[in-house]
Amino acid sequence: MHESLTDKLNQLEQKFAAMGQDMASYLEGLLQADYLTYWDYIHLETLLSLQNPKTTYPDELIFVTYHQITELYFKLVLHEIDQIANAAPLTASFFVDRMFRVNQYFKLLEDSFSIMITGMEREQFLKFRMALLPSSGFQSVQFRKIEIVSTDFRNLVVAAPTEPEYISDLYEFMYWKRGATELSTQEKTLTLKQFDQHNGPVLVKLAEEYQFKNLLHQYQHLVRDGQSTSELANALREYDWRVNIRWKLAHLRSAVQHLQKAQDNTHATGGTNWQTYLPPNQQLMVFFPELWTEEELRNWGKSPSHPDSL
């Protein structure tokens, strides 16, 4: 028997013995198992069965498929941030490598958003969207999770009348709730009520879990230990810019393309006030305020270009 194969069998035997298992039984199972196919590995049939348009308009398939693709990228972003949050020990190089992946995901998402802007007929969109009420991309809980695990929870809060002691109290003042509040009555839209009921407790729990291991906290920890690098700071600046300016500008361009008319502005499907909510210079959300100059913060969201020309 080939020496390397013998070594591997010995390693396997030690592995199973350490767990009190019989290696021969596992080898027998391997003999009985069929070969893995690509379509079984990625569950292709199941994956392709998940696109279920609510109308007969052809472009709705584009709409639902693109949103599902977006949510899969969000899943990857959360996966990378989870690794940074739980790395022990965390190093600047590990942090940078994972942030490079995250920035690539958001770059791909932004670049592909042209599908939503020009890849559908406006007339079809304005018709099939009415069958989707009151659902809205606003209800993407994964994007809200990305925001929460990226920064201090208080950086996502606006207009809190006092200084609440608990995250559960701060949750009512999350900045994005302004985007699903009726401007005239200040009442929550059904879109927001549904979202809070379904996701509120989950998001509060996540914020509590990440209070001392979100991206901002982990960066500050490396700074205090003298382990931070300019490469890491630049990676986090790029991330801040991509999420809080570029990604939101892409949404704004899509809304303008499909919802804005010459004499009237069509409401979004969930009743969100997108005209005042979507522009980054209205939201003024920044994950890492200490990484930006006062001038950069004053001009936040007013230009799509990155200050470092990334």
Image (cartoon, grey):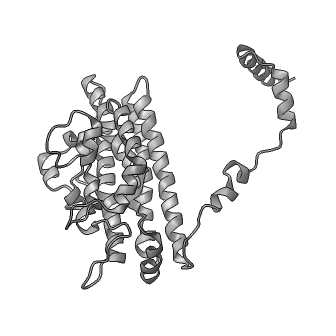
Q: Position of residue 30 (x, y in %)?
A: 82, 33
Toward the viewer: 194 or 223? 194
Task: Report the residue at 37% width, 66% height from top.
Answer: 270
Q: Position of residue 19 (x, y in %)?
A: 71, 17
**Quadrant of residue 130 in the image?**
bottom left
Number of numbered discs on residues: 0
Toward the viewer: 82 or 132? 132
**Quadrant of residue 214 in the image?**
top left
**Quadrant of residue 258 in the image?**
bottom left
Q: Position of residue 213 (x, y in %)?
A: 35, 31
Is residue 309 visible from the viewing direction of this image? Answer: no
Task: Report the residue at 39% width, 38% height from top.
Answer: 206
Toward the viewer: 250 or 179? 179
Is residue 138 visible from the viewing direction of this image? Answer: yes
* Residue 18 falls left or right of residue 163: right
Task: Report the residue at 32% width, 38% height from top.
Answer: 231
Q: Position of residue 227 (x, y in %)?
A: 30, 26
Relative vertical location of residue 211 with respect to residue 13 in this rendering, above or below: below
Task: Report the residue at 67% width, 56% height from top.
Answer: 46
Quadrant in which the N terminus is drawn: top right
Toward the viewer: 280 or 145? 145
Relative vertical location of residue 8 with respect to residue 43 in this rendering, above or below: above
